[in-house]
Amino acid sequence: MTIKDQIKSLQEELRQHNYNYYVLDNPTISDYEFDMKLKQLQELEAKHPEFADANSPTQRVGGAITKNFETVKHEHRMYSLDNSYSKEDLLDWETRLKKMIDGPIQFTCELKYDGASISLTYENGSLLRAVTRGDGVQGDDVTANVKTIKSVPLQLKGDYPTKFDIRGEIVLPFEGFNKMNEEREEIGEELYRNPRNTASGSLKLQDSAEVAKRPLECLLYNITGSNLGIKTQFESLEKARAWGFKVPNAAKLANSIDEVLEFVEYWDVKRHDLPYETDGVVVKVNSLQHQDELGYTAKAPRWAMAYKFKAEQVSTVLLEITYQVGRTGAITPVANLEPVELAGTTVKRASLHNADQIEKLDIREGDTVFVEKGGEIIPKIITVDLSQRPSNSTPTQYITHCPECETELIRQVGEAQHYCPNYNGCKPQIIGRIQHFISRKAMDIDGLGGETVALLVNAGLISNYSDLYELKREDILPLERMAEKSAENLINGIELSKAVPFERVLFALGIRYVGETVAKKLAKHYKNIDSLIATTPEALVSVDEIGERIAESVTAFFTSKENLEIISKLKHFGLQMSLSEEQLANQTDKLVGKTFVVSGVFQSVSRNELKKLIEDNGGKVSASISSKTSFVVAGDNMGPSKRDKAEKLGIPIITEQDFLDMII
């Protein structure tokens, strides 16, 4: 046997033993024998680097140092899930599905593991890249660290597709987490707070050898790509398992919502016996064709729902109610609590939302309150233990003036929150707007964080976000903790932000009610800032997904003299105030005012490409047929009830080719 064949044989043998141990939990050799074979392979590869393999089992030990994690755009966006907390929520979801899908609906039920989301890309059976979820559009490349996780296959087996992404959760089992804390306790180090945060933090360690020491596991649940030859979610789990991935066996096929609820009830009790943290169940429409038809909202797939188990509750004492001022001037009352452990973290504060919530619960300083983590993330007060209320307790009087600038607060009719109207003179609003402007989803200015923004404002160097573009290195060097290199990075980051596309600039302006999705809709419709400034509330309401409240807010923003002056400055500094030529290249108004429903399987273009063509030509895509539908684009396997409804309403049913002819 040649050296090359010997190396290859050892690699294959060790991959199989690794799979047996970490995926099947069924080792066939001792740890000592495995270590000896691994050592033999390491020595052979060291002597013969010409036969090196980036996905050799020897790479599991780590050693690569990553100083800066490269930001990578996901080829397929990683969406978050809509949450449900009751049987009624799931039944409502099923009702919505039945309006859009013909015939019986099967569901795949899976446990929702609480870890760090990851996207793995495989090409020709080899691990190409591992990227964190990030903001769903882009994340950090953590390939070197993920390669050390033994349950992540570096080389697949079987009939895998040429290229695909597989999504999952990096978790830290309770046993491993407890062992890590025992070791830290012995050496007098601070203990890790909970498995989820520890798993997430592990992915961003600079030394992959340190990651290799942690008993992390990777549980996979979703395959994404083109032409995969898979028809259902449940089949995709079975395929992934066959290719070598660790796919939990708890997943179950359900033929009705009643069977889904049985699964939920069973695991709400049995989850406490699992080796990992779980916080709910994920229910998915099983048919991938149905998933395709249902599509996505701006943030989540319509075909999936996360059912969250009842959150953990604890009681503690409300020490003081304070008030925060947000970037829009909204006042948020905050409960400052006696510190208490909740779901693995120490909770000291909880939002009280608004004056109505305080009045409804009759919350007072000194009360003993029950706190839970809503959706396992944000602490909230559920109720007051009136039996513990002090005898001298007095009702909470909501503040009448801004806690920062003393301006009298206002509350619009129909609004839940009070507002400080001192838009240009209230410091938290000014700082908050600039912090929003520089944030990752907006201008993403590298080298400039929230604390630095506060320093710049407090030092009188900036008073709005256009002032950032006038900063010079010598202006910021005197600031606290601002070294030469930091100042240089900040100025470079500001300069680079001038290339950020128009829809993100529009989002960055911080117009009330204009989030990412609305900013994209407005940018696509109006194409440049001047057209948007010149529009009317009536015209805005005609834009897809723009209601009266958003229209009024946008109009008010652009009638402000101060805002127009800031926008004029931003134009002067060279920010992108219109769609690029590339974005405009394929856009027309041929389908303006027309609404399309896309149903079935298509030949020339994929469903997503078809939807994009509709939107690029000014049309609107709807998920369900109604009297407002202009056309139904029908492919193969279009559901009979959809066809019946379209015919009953007199809506034209056109073919894929008919549609393509419309936009020529």
Image (cartoon, rainbow, N blue to C red):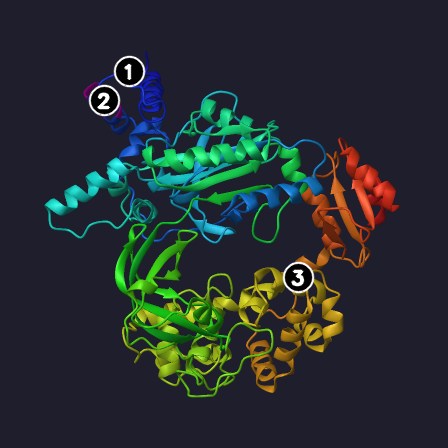
| Residue at image mark 1 | 28
* Disc on the earlier residue, 2 or 3: 2
Bounds of the magenta segment: 32-41
Look at 32% across and 28% down and name the residue there. 57
Q: Main secondary structure of the magenta part?
A: helix
Q: Position of residue 273 (x, y in %)?
A: 32, 33
Whichever of callouts 3 and 1 sits on the residue coming sooner in the sequence is 1
Point out residue 104 in the picture as x, y percentages from the top left corner: 67, 31
Label 2 Cα crowd, 10 Å radius (few <14 / some 14-19 / many 20+): few
Q: Disc 2 vs disc 3: which is toward the camera?
A: 3
- Nearest the camera: 49 or 11? 11
Disc 2, SS = helix
- Alpha-carbon distance for marks 3 and 1? 57 Å
**Where is residue 563 shown, x and y percent of the image?**
58, 81
Q: Residue 127 location, x and y as percent?
A: 43, 34
Residue at the image point whose x is 80% and y is 44% from the top? 632
Residue located beneath label 2 in the image: 40
Which quadrant would the N terminus be assigned to in this image? top left
Name the kind of residue labelled 1 in the image. Thr
Check disc 1: other Cα within 10 Å, few if <14, some if 14-19, many if 20+.
Answer: few
Is residue 38 part of the magenta span, yes or no?
yes
Q: Amino acid at mark 3?
A: Lys
Query: Any mark on residue 521, and which?
Result: 3
